[in-house]
Image: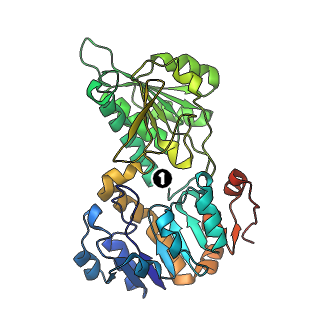
Amino acid sequence: MQIGIPREVKVKENRVACTPGGVRMLVQSGHTVLVENDAGIGAGYDNAQYELAGAKIVPMAADAWSAEMVIKVKEPIASEYEFLRPDLILFTYLHLAADQPLTVKLAEQKVASIAYETVQVGRRLPLLEPMSEIAGRMASIVGAHFLSKAQGGKGVLLGGVPGVSPGKALVMGGGTAGINAGRVAAGIGAEVTILEVDLEKMRFLDITMHSTAHTLYSNEQNLLEALPSVDLLIGAVLLPGAKAPKLITRKMLEVMKPGTVFVDIAIDQGGCAETSRPTTHEDPIYFEEDILHYCVANMPGAYARTSTQALTNATSQYALKIANLGLEEALRQMPELKPGLNTYGGHVTYQAVADAHGLAYIPYE
């Protein structure tokens, strides 16, 4: 199979879909890999490294997109829509529940699109997990940074100092992102509370988390009671493939202290607050009701080298299987790929995406 790796074009997106090591694995299996010129430069991989791995460097994005299967990091943006076509297999993060124009375009162009974030093994989302881990850890780091008065925060040092109480971090959601956010915040020295509804998961967190981290059953009353004393609020809720629930209303912001920092990891899925809207690494924050919002839609792109390596570790085996077998046979042999298929043959084939946009859901079968 011919596999294309275009350069990412989203603002400040420095990741690349595959490391030279991943490319080598594909080439050794007999496939042709077309890497757009300087596609890996932001993650520290130059053209020579890809050529050494057996890739062919192509000068233009259109050349990489001409391949049978295109592997990306982020969803196509409007400037890339021209490359979508009926015989294309697209393997990338899509987050279609928050993007109706792209959903419609993929269906119109009859693209076979597989979303990393909806590939599912049991209750796990193996291709989303590595980026959730990074985004979760980042959330506490950037939250601590923006709590600085110089950055617009309330001037609270999250870890405190001897004789001064530490800051309070409230994490909504005890999944992969939430656990990682909580661990880093607790490691800094913050007093951490994780809101969760799964009692078994709360028991696990209680056993494994730092002694300064606690769990609290997630309901509106507990959230309302916690918000006035919070310094850092982290939104880490996830409904696989669906829009994130709006747990934070504008009214709730009014009970929080000015300069409180809100990091919305769920922004890729539309955000978990009424006031959330996507931002970029170039312009990451804004204020609503005196609350600092950090809603960068591609958070792991800030740590491009680590993110690229972690992503390739997770996705390469699936990309290789699709290339070796073809899409239909890969779907048959790897049933976990089937929920990853979001559009196929002109139809929306993932129910949560169809429901989010009021479109018809047609199962792959």
Q: What colour scheme governs how the chains and residues are painted in the rendered image of this protein?
A: rainbow
Q: Position of residue 207 (x, y in %)?
A: 47, 32
Which quarter of the picture shows residue 35? Answer: bottom left
Which quarter of the picture shows residue 110? Answer: bottom right
Residue 80 in view here? yes
Q: Position of residue 189 (x, y in %)?
A: 32, 26
Q: Residue at x 33, y 69 (%)?
A: 19
Q: Residue at x 60, y 43 (%)?
A: 244
Provide the secondary structure element on which disc 1 rests.
helix
Q: Is residue 88 left or right of residue 145?
A: right
Q: Is residue 41 left or right of residue 214?
A: left
Name the residue carrying label 1: 129
Number of on-image labels: 1
Q: Residue at x 33, y 27 (%)?
A: 152
277 relative to 99, above or below: above
Q: Amino acid at mark 1?
A: Glu
